[in-house]
Amino acid sequence: MERVIATDDEAKASEAASEPSNAAISFITTEHFTLQGARASTIAESTGRASMFLASVSGGLVAFGLVATATGVGGAFYAFGLVLLPTLAFIGLVTFERTLQSGVEDLGYARRIARLRAYYFDKAPELAPYLLSVPPKHRLSHVEGLRGGYAQGFRTVAGMVGVITAVLLGSEIGLGVSAAFDAPAAALALGCVIGLAVVLALMRYQRHAWGQAATETFPDEEPIAI
């Protein structure tokens, strides 16, 4: 049996062929920074929309209190409240939907960054002692910092907006019942039931959206537990 011994030149040529080209390295680096910028944009938009919503709720409730002080609990008070609360609830619903979309979009960017980071470890394994290396199936959850369980939905920006929106809708129903029937106890009970139902519906909708996004994984990744 003839034994073939590779020369130094052949070994160097084989090693050079296995190394990524300069164009590939440049593209990967640029793509990484582009995705980081895109993630920053989605986070900034979610924060900005949530801030505008909270400012609207704060200003509206202050105006509601001033109307109550000026006119008392009468016709003007109920009329103003029944116009104000649905408006704030509408702002909350559209804010909830958009911040949820931004969160799902951010998840997609994080997935792509995790893939690029895996490329660094594959092509430069000597970096592993200096950078935190994560097994392939855990790369995405590590980048996102996500935790499983139903309570995770309340930790998101969309979840926070959803809870406040549910309170506004429950308050609107309670105010309407109180104005129509002058039954404070029934108004409070019905408002609480409606508010709780809206919270559960929004959290279920959010969980479904995140579940769909989390199952769209690459072959070597495990789905995120939402």
Image: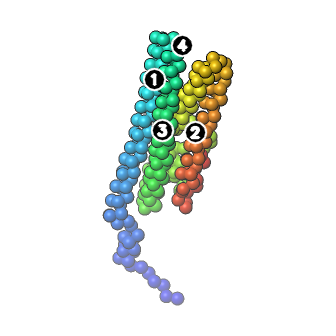
Under mark 1, the amino acid is: Gly
- Foreground residue, 124 or 176? 176
Q: Nearer the viewer, mark 3 or mark 2?
A: 3
Q: Earlier in the sequence, mark 3 or mark 2?
A: 3
Query: How far is disc 4 from disc 2 in space, using C-alphas?
Result: 32 Å
Of the two numbered discs 2 and 1 on the same chain, state the one appearing first in sequence: 1
Question: Which residue corresponds to the image point at 57% horizontal and 54% vertical from the top-left?
Answer: 215
Q: Position of residue 112 (x, y in %)?
A: 45, 54
Most foreground residue, 76 or 23:
76
Label 1 vs 3, first from the N-terminus? 1
* Tag count: 4
Q: Confirm or deny contact between disc 1 and disc 3 (CB under 8 A).
A: no
Q: Position of residue 196 (x, y in %)?
A: 63, 31
Question: Which of 20 and 29 lies nearest the eye of the viewer?
Answer: 29
Amino acid type shown at disc 4: Val
The residue under the point 60% across, 35% down is: 198
What distance separates the C-alpha of mark 1 from that of mark 3?
17 Å
Disc 4 designates what residue?
73
User: Residue type at mark 2?
Assistant: Leu
What is the spatial separation of the Cα atoms under label 1 and label 4, in whole angstroms?
17 Å
> Where does residue 165 sit, x and y in percent of width and height?
53, 32
The residue wearing badge 1 is: 60
**Gap in Å between the C-alphas at discs 4 and 3?**
30 Å
For mark 3, what is the residue? 94
Per the image, label 2 sits on a secondary structure element best described as helix
Q: Secondary structure at mark 1?
A: helix
Within the image, what quadrant is residue 13 found in?
A: bottom left
Determine crowd level at label 2: few under 14, some 14-19, many 20+ residues with C-alpha closer than 10 A.
Answer: many
The foreground one among 212 and 151 is: 212
> Residue 11 at x, y = what percent?
39, 74
Q: Which numbered circle lies on residue 202? A: 2
